[in-house]
């Protein structure tokens, strides 16, 4: 198995970021469709992690780490689909567009426009999948999934703002490290393993991923959780999103570009 060295990985990330920036300017409709698909892919990972993770209540009641491990093992399918199929994910783009920005391949405005458009597309894709392919299909109607959906959503809007922000940093640090690891390989297996390990870790650790929460919180609301739209936005999505930006853009994108790019080429 031959993988790229760290500098080549960051170079590949810079090239990918430049391509995404160009797509933002040249073909916004295609960018939005790709972003909607990414939101749906993450939601697929979300429902799979819930079905498997909460599907063994007798086992996990006495072994709470098992539920976290099972959910963590299932959730990475979403990022694997995003990376392998080339969809546009907000949290991944938080890191990918930073090295290309530092190389002056596009402007800050283009990067921010990409983030905003992709975030909106991810939201639409996640919501549509949650409503049509999960709620209307009755995947969480029966127990223990009905109660699990409510409890997960309620827990996400019950944490202090600062805690959600910090957990958002942790989540996207892991997700963007997964993207970097995926860029190190060329085969499907290499990319899948690269995605799987860090994402499994962030789910098991209970960090907060804004796009995943576009699935978990609306699902809980549909199943009857006492959560308002204002609660979802103010107490979770905003701090999680800001934390995700910090974790991806600063701890992965900017840090790796600083380490691996020579000063004159940044």
Image (cartoon, rainbow, N blue to C red):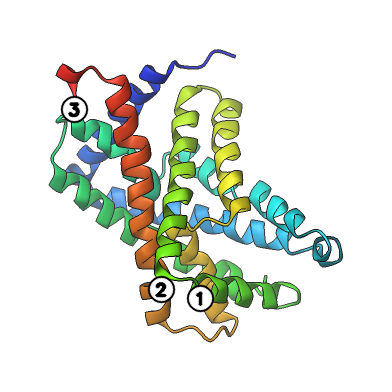
Q: Position of residue 41 (x, y in %)?
A: 51, 52
Answer whether residue 263 is visible to the viewer in this image.
yes
Residue at the disc numbered 3: 103
Report how far apart the C-alphas of labels 2 and 1 lie in the structure: 8 Å
Report how far apart the C-alphas of labels 1 and 3 lie in the structure: 41 Å
Marks counted in the figure total: 3
Closer to us: 191 or 31: 191
Tell me the mark number nearer the camera, choosing from 1 and 3. 1
Q: For numbered disc 3, what is the local secondary structure?
A: loop
Judged left or right of residue 240, residue 53 is right
Residue at image x 72%, y 52%? 70
Q: Position of residue 19 (x, y in %)?
A: 26, 34
Judged left or right of residue 82, residue 55 is right
Residue at the disc numbered 1: 158
Please tell me which of labels 2 and 1 falls first in the chain: 1
Residue at the disc numbered 2: 235
Q: Residues within 10 Å of mark 2 (few under 14, many from 20)?
A: many
């Amino acid at each position: 198995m031959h993988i790229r060295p760290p500098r080549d990985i960051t170079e590949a990330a810079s090239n990918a970021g430049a391509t995404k920036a160009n797509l933002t300017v040249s073909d916004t409709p295609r960018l939005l469709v790709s972003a909607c698909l990414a939101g749906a892919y993450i939601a697929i990972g979300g429902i799979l992690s819930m079905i498997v993770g909460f599907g063994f209540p007798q086992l996990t009641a006495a072994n709470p780490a098992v539920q976290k491990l099972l959910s963590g093992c299932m959730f990475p399918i979403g990022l694997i689909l995003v990376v392998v199929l080339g969809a546009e994910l907000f949290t991944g783009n938080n890191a990918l567009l930073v090295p290309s920005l530092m190389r002056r391949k596009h402007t800050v405005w283009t990067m921010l426009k990409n983030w905003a458009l992709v975030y909106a597309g991810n939201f639409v894709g996640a919501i549509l999948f949650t409503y049509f392919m999960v709620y209307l299909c009755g995947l969480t109607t029966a127990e223990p999934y009905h109660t699990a959906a409510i409890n997960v959503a309620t827990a996400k809007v019950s944490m202090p703002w600062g805690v959600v922000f910090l957990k958002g940093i942790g989540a996207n640090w892991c997700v963007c490290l997964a993207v970097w690891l995926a860029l190190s390989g060329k085969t499907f297996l290499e990319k899948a393993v690269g995605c799987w390990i860090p994402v499994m870790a962030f789910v098991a650790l209970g960090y907060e991923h804004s796009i995943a929460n576009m699935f978990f919180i609306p699902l809980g609301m549909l199943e009857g959780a006492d959560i308002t739209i204002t609660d979802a936005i103010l107490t979770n999505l905003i701090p999680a999103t800001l934390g995700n930006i910090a974790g991806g853009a600063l701890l992965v994108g900017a840090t790796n570009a600083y380490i691996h790019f020579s000063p004159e080429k940044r």
